[in-house]
Amino acid sequence: MEILIAAIFILGYLAITLEHSININKAATALVTGVLCWTVYILASGHDHTAVVHHLNEHMGEISEILFFLMGAMVIVELIDAHDGFDIITERIRTTDKRKLLWITSIITFFLSAILDNLTTTIVMVSLLRKLIDNKEDRMLFVGITVVAANAGGAWSPMGDVTTTMLWIGGQITAGNIIKMLFLPSLVCLLAPLLILSRSVKGKVETPVKPESDGSVDSTPFERKAVFAIGVGSLVFVPVFKTFTHLPPFMGILLGLGVMWILTELIHKDKDEIEKGPRSVNHALRKIDTPSILFFLGILVAVAALQSAGMLTGIAGWLDRTVGNITAIGIIIGFLSAIVDNVPLVAAAQGMYSMDVYPTDHFFWEFLAYCTGTGGSALIIGSAAGVAAMGMEKIDFFWYFKRITVWAVIGYLAGAAVYVGLTQLVGH
């Protein structure tokens, strides 16, 4: 049984990594992989079908929390974008000096990623860079460092990266502690490559000519400010809501979405359906990245089958025996996340290592959040932010490897060293 489940998972994983080569969406592969793993598990369990279904139901409760959280956050971000709320940030960037612009956009990306998430922030910042930089080669360099900044910014926030969110919802980390312990290492992870790259950047950027208006009605200044403030406030409010109520994070995000829904309905109550359609929650629900949500569902279901079959515990034991050091294990997992998706890596780690051994806010969980959040920057395909940038700007894998990878790795290792030193300093 275990060999067959492992074979299905590995083949499914391989198909996911070769998504663009085989032209099959990774969400479809993940769903098939997840269901097949559980099918083999229940058929091989003999007559104990009730116990297997019970295990599946338990896992689905945890998985549903993650999916509802992601869906709510995506809709809120879509509403902000539909009302041109992010223009509040972009309109304030006026410099054309390359070095200054590199620093400004990188720092904005770093902090914006912590509030939104690294994928959404990358999409927003690439769209911004298109408005600020006309030269393709210059823009690709900026986009490359944006990927590093987005991943670094997402690692220290409970909502900045889906893997950090998974650890937060799973109870392995708490919001306040992950911010306190990972902010400085994540900042160093960005500053190290930024300092190196900015020394080679000189001159001014060429700003593209603004296109003529297409005649569509823009959002009013009040609408932009109101939706931006309520939307960002809703996202920031989630950790506070969880702290005071002890309810799961997805309840806080659903509350924020409900408030946003009411606000937008009131704002557009006097408009006809055609005018308010693109700015409605119904439209935002259609625009969110549903395939990504289904991908998370499929891969988390597959990993849950490995966990229920006891395979992940065996892998954890093998790593402990062969590597031994949890710091080294974290570094290795981080580098692996540059090759394979970090979502199943973290899901596997959650199943491999018991919270009885590594309790909430233990060194291992925090270091895992940092490593899987930032290690993916080493390759353009190593993170959702990188894949989004690759698709939007048509960045070549080998261009990124030659221009960004070495600096991203230096930042990753520098931040890791800072975290280890910080934990020793505070006795964590």
Image (spheres, helix red, strand yellow):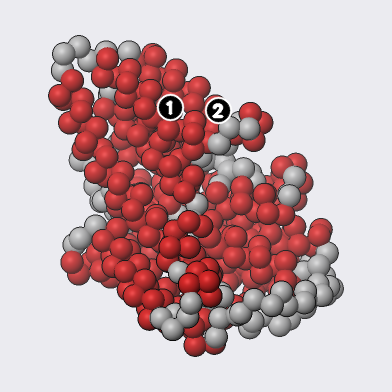
Q: Which residue is mark 1?
A: 33
Comes first in the chain, label 1 or label 2: 2
Q: Write down the residue under mark 2.
A: 15
Residue at image point 18% right, 20% down: 49
Q: Looking at the image, which is closer to me, 215 or 281?
A: 215
Where residue 325 sits, quadrant-wise, is top left
Pointers 1 and 2 in contact (CB under 8 A)? yes
Tell whether 221 sits left or right of 239: right
The structure residue drawn at horizontal position 42% and vertical position 73%, both measured from the top left corner, is: 231
Where is residue 386 shown, x and y percent of the image? 61, 50
Relative depth, front residue between 403 and 42? 42
Mark carried by residue 262? none
Task: Look at label 1 and name its amino acid.
Answer: Thr
- Total numbered labels placed on residues in the image: 2
* Residue 329 drawn above or below residue 67: above
The x and y percentages for residue 303 are 36, 32
Q: Position of residue 15 (x, y in %)?
A: 55, 28
Task: Say which quadrant the N terminus sits in.
Answer: top left
Amino acid on which the number 2 mark rests in the picture: Ala
Q: Residue at x 57, y 53 (%)?
A: 385
Dot 1 falls on a residue whose secondary structure is helix
**Mark 1, other Cα within 10 Å: few <14 / some 14–19 / many ≥20:** many
